[in-house]
Amino acid sequence: MRKLQVAIAAAGLVLGVIAYQILRDDLHQSVIRSLPAVAIGWSAIASGLIAWRRRPANRLGPLMVAYGLAVLIRPWQYSGEALMFTIGYALGQLNVALFGHTALAYPTGRVTDRLELWLVRAGYVFAVLIPFATLLVYDGGGLRYVPPGPGSVLLVRADHELALDLEQTFVIVVYGILAACFVALVVRKLVLATPRLRRILAPLLLAAVLAALRALTEFAFTFISPVPEFLDNLYWWQVAGQILLPIALLAGLLRARLARAHIADLLVELDSTPPDGIRDALARHLGDASLELVFWLPERGAYVDGNGVTVELPLPGAGRSVTAIAHDGEPVAAILHDPSLDEEPELVRSAGTAARFALENARLHAEVRAQLVQVQESRRRIVAAGDEQRRRIERDIHDGAQQRLVALALELRATQRRLGARVDPDVERVLSGAVEELQVAVSELRELARGLHPAILSEEGLAGALESLAARTPLEVTVAAAPPERLPPEIEAAAYFVACEALANAVKHADASRVTISAVHADDSLRVEVADDGRGGANSAGSGLRGLADRLEAHGGRLTVASPAGGGTRVVGELPCAS
């Protein structure tokens, strides 16, 4: 392979010298006009050989070399030798097809899009067939781009008008239709690309501009006479762009190698980077702002994110790619990244290997967070189970013992009415006492059931339950605000018991005369506030308030108590509650 590349480099030098001599001697161009064509070819060949050597598996290097050779062969069509003219006209037009193929194949070296494949194939077909057909009828009488000279060695039947028509057809099809399609496909490619890939494909904007300028100048020279003077300036812009394009493509192709050269910098950065910053460091190094890190937890048999939440790896074709990071055959983490990085697997692996120790440390943090998530979920389940048990006991009391006692009291009342005045006074006294005791028992059971879980909370929601609670409290209680909509049952229960405990403390310990309750649902949270005008000094570490804090924290909320001596008490519960 090395010998082949050396031979191509030597051939490029020779072809460049020959092209320069033909442009100077046969076409009588000035040095300033002759050198650019050679510079374009040498730029493409040099860039292509470097890319070929550095990325031998990528076809972009050979494509750039072929494009450069075609550019240097094209001046042969101005030669006074018939064979050189024929070769130059037959092969030189391929530079147009190779230009489009190279641009559309960047950066992978392959064209996979169906529309782009059709355009590349059409370019080669027209770049070969039309010049070949022209050579079959060209007798040397001169064309729009070729001065009179030797005829084609492939001449079959001279037809000068047909040769001119074929040349014009080539301009219309290649520099008109196909060039317009090329520009449209480049724009489409850039629009559909991900942000990272769009940055990589930036040189294609230069290719699109060059194609548009080339089409404009070719059409002008073919169909406009005299040619406008400003087109001469476009010619020099076009030359500059054609020299720079292979260099830009090479730079983009080798960016992964340049990035790998800074692995040591990444190691130094990660040495002082906390676990939460590893993702950002890798994202900067790989140039992918959408990058995600997930960590493998063996005991769970799953990947989790930095917060310990289980993550499913994306499936192939989902628009995201996965690179696994392992140590001694055991998975450590995985990098979820832009699919454009699939063309640079060594870059991702190098960065992942450099970050392996930091990733193992971050995995420990993720494991701790995962355990915290499990504890949080366990607390939430315990509270939910307790609430459900409260509701069940409340229903059992209401539908069982309470109903039986009420029925027994009614039966005794009915017995009293049936006996009337005939009943012995002692029996009447016993019956009346029993009925009163039953009524007291029913009231106590009703209060007990309401304390476990008020039925009105399930039936009418938090607003109705707070109004009922205020009505039963032997203080002046004002419900200043309550959410009219129903909220999740566990959230309503937690908020209700905050109000219950705060009111109970106000009645028993605060010596308060007025209490205000406010429950506001906004910004995906529920805020319950109970404020009294009592003597303050409440102990927030007491068992009642501590139990409330545990209940709220189990739902991801928090409880705060402000109770300065002599300044009343304010109990505030905050609960996450999406609309």
Image (tube, rainbow, N blue to C red):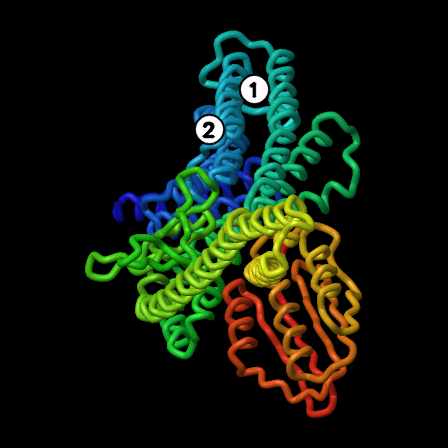
Residue at point 30% right, 60% down?
332
Residue at point 66% right, 68% down?
499
Q: Which mark is residue 184?
A: none
SS of the residue at dot 2? helix
User: x%, y% of residue 313?
Assistant: 39, 47
Tag count in the figure? 2
Which quadrant, please, contains the N terminus?
Answer: top left
Disc 1 target residue = 140
Q: Are marks 1 and 2 in contact (CB under 8 Å)?
A: no
The answer to whether residue 135 is seen in the rendering is: yes
User: x%, y% of residue 314?
Assistant: 42, 44
The amino acid sitting under disc 2 is Leu
The amino acid sitting under disc 1 is Gly
Examine the image and state in which quarter residue 535 appears: bottom right
User: x%, y% of residue 440?
Assistant: 61, 62
Disc 2 target residue = 91
Q: Taking 440 as reference, is 407 above or below it?
A: above
The answer to whether residue 65 is seen in the rendering is: no
SS of the residue at dot 1? loop
